């Protein structure tokens, strides 16, 4: 029997493709999009071609890792194996061969639609609270905090407070190691003895196994922290600042970003606290957008 608890468990257990620490937020983004539309009163099924393909492609471009191509058809098809997602009009889709998946064009040609199965959809339409609970669960499991908040705002979830599982010791140790200043720009504003808008950023996200250790942290001002999590700014293997070619704006943006391109970051005094190479490489591969 379907229940809120069983649906939460099923969503927490969705199969995510994993290889060498690569991010694959395809299913989480599809689920967030579907839940946001259900919250607005959408019917059970979404047509892949007219309702899923373009919006999910857009979300993958902006919130997924940079890739040569994006495949919104893959989570749409594969989610049916997770116990609560149903597809219709699949009879003519070819599922032979090693992949057992049809070409993306077949989903369009055959007018394939998908959505939560009937029993779980009934739970959702009767409880916007459940929709928000599931959205928060997905966000916290797959995205770092600043991205959680951005997606929640964009997709219209009523989440009063993203729960912040912050380790106060991590923040304290990282800020101390970096002498209480932004490693990019040197920002070190204080109000009496309290640092203002200075944060400890995880280089490799906690959601992908990044530890709360100094070598996986950077002290960043609030602006550069958000930019770092979005992939607008990064650090290369020589500890020099990288700026995404997509960054643009007025002279203030130039001073905050382009003026630091290629500059050495402010490193801790003690070498054992330097960022670990493997964490820097993960961010460069999975988050930074060239």
Image: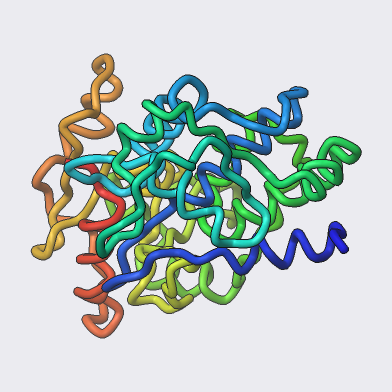
Q: Residue furthest top?
A: 250
Q: Is residue 218 above or below residue 133?
A: below
Q: What residue is at 62 percent from the left and 54 percent from the top?
A: 138
For this rendering, which residue is in front, 178 or 242?
A: 242
The image shows residue 131 at horizontal and vertical percentages of: 77, 43
**Which residue is outermost to the right?**
126
Q: How far across and down, in percent of the image, does residue 97 sit?
A: 25, 60
Give the quadrant of residue 174.
Answer: bottom left
Q: Residue at x 62, y 36 (%)?
A: 34
Q: Quadrant of the N terminus?
A: bottom right
Q: Is residue 200 left or right of residue 21?
A: right
Left or right, 230 with reference to 154: left
Q: Residue at x 43, y 59 (%)?
A: 201
Instruction: Name the residue at the bottom extreme.
Output: 272
Residue 109's spot in the image, x, y percent?
Answer: 37, 26
219 vs 61: above or below: below
**Residue 238 figure quarter:** bottom left
Does residue 187 appear anywhere in the picture? Answer: no
Marker count (numbered)? 0
Residue at 28%, 45% in the rendered image: 185
């Amino acid at each position: 029997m379907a229940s809120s608890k069983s649906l939460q468990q099923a969503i927490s257990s969705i199969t995510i493709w994993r290889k060498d620490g690569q991010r694959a937020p395809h299913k989480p983004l599809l689920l967030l999009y579907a839940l946001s539309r259900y919250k607005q009163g959408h019917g059970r099924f979404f047509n892949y071609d007219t309702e899923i393909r373009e919006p999910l492609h857009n979300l993958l471009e902006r919130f997924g890792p940079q890739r040569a191509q994006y495949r919104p058809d893959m989570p749409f098809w594969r989610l049916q194996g997770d116990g609560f997602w149903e597809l219709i009009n699949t009879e003519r889709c070819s599922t032979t061969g090693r992949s057992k998946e049809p070409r993306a064009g077949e989903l369009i040609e055959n007018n394939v639609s998908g959505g939560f199965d009937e029993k779980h959809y009934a739970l959702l339409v009767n409880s916007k609270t459940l929709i928000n609970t599931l959205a928060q669960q997905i966000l916290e499991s797959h995205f770092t905090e600043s991205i959680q908040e951005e997606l929640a705002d964009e997709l219209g979830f009523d989440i009063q407070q993203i729960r912040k599982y912050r380790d106060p010791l991590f923040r304290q140790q990282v800020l101390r190691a970096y002498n209480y200043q932004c490693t990019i720009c040197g920002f070190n504003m204080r109000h009496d003895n309290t640092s203002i808008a200075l944060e400890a950023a995880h280089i490799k996200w906690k959601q992908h196994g990044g530890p709360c250790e100094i070598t996986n942290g950077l002290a960043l001002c609030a602006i550069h922290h958000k930019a770092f999590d979005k992939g607008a700014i990064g650090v290369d293997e020589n500890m020099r600042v990288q700026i995404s070619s997509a960054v643009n704006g007025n002279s203030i943006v130039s001073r905050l970003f382009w003026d630091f391109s290629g500059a050495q970051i402010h490193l801790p005094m003690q070498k054992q606290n330097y960022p670990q190479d493997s964490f820097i490489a993960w961010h460069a591969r999975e988050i930074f957008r060239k």
